[in-house]
Amino acid sequence: MDLSDLQREHAAWLEHNFPDQKAHEPLLGLTEEVGELAHAHLKHEQGIRGLADQDLAYTKKMDAVGDIVIYLASYCTANNIELDKAVRLAWFEVSQRDWVEDPEGAAQ
């Protein structure tokens, strides 16, 4: 599945399940999921709350990453952004940067 397919399928699911969702609501869910990913990393690094186990930590991180992409698709749909196009354009810009050769100017 590519990002365009994901966004199209998710848009249909969203229209069925949450037809009155406000355009900013997916951003709140996205932020929550980024927090869950950070939490999984922190607790794994600290070796607490069961996340010392590599497999459980991996599962939690994988779940959060998947949810982040879904919420991002939702945000893009609600705000008329083509997720695939946005990622391709951003990757083109990022891929042109060479931090090894130009560590001072690469961010420009």
Image (cartoon, rainbow, N blue to C red):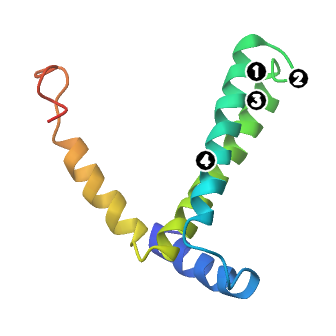
Q: CA distance from mark 2 to mark 1?
A: 8 Å
Number of marks: 4
Give percent across and percent down for residue 62.
68, 43
Could you tell me how far apart the alpha carbons at marks 3 and 4 are, in whole angstroms? 19 Å
Q: Kindly state the secondary structure of the residue where label 4 is placed.
A: helix
Are the residues tagged 4 and 2 within 8 Å (C-beta)? no
Q: Which of the two discs, 3 and 1, labels the residue nearer the N terminus?
A: 1
Amino acid at the residue labelled 3? Ala
Which label lies toward us, 3 or 4? Answer: 4
Does dot 1 land on a helix, a strand or a loop? Answer: helix
Percent x, y of residue 85:
32, 67
Name which of mark 3 and mark 4 comes first in the sequence: 4
Q: Which residue is painted at 11% across and 21% down in the image?
A: 101
Secondary element type, mark 3:
helix
Vertical placement of residue 4 versus 43, above or below: below
Q: Which residue is mark 2?
A: 50
In three-dimensional space, the C-alpha distance between marks 4 and 2, rounded to whole angstroms, equals 23 Å
Do the residues under discs 2 and 1 have CB atoms within 8 angstroms?
A: yes
Q: How would you rate the neighbour count of disc 1 (Cα within 10 Å): few for under 14, some for 14-19, many for 20 or more? A: some
Label 4 amino acid? Thr
Dot 2: what SS?
A: loop
Left or right, 71 with respect to 36, comes to left
Which corner quadrant holds the N terminus? bottom right
- Pointer 3 and pointer 1: residues touching (CB < 8 Å)? yes
Circle 3 is placed at which residue position?
57
Q: Is residue 50 rendered to the left or right of residue 37?
A: right
Q: Quadrant of residue 58 in the image?
A: top right
Which of 96/71 is in front? 71
Between label 4 and label 2, give the one nearer the viewer.
Answer: 4
Q: CA distance from mark 3 to mark 1?
A: 8 Å
Which numbered disc, 2 or 1, marks the residue closer to the eye?
1
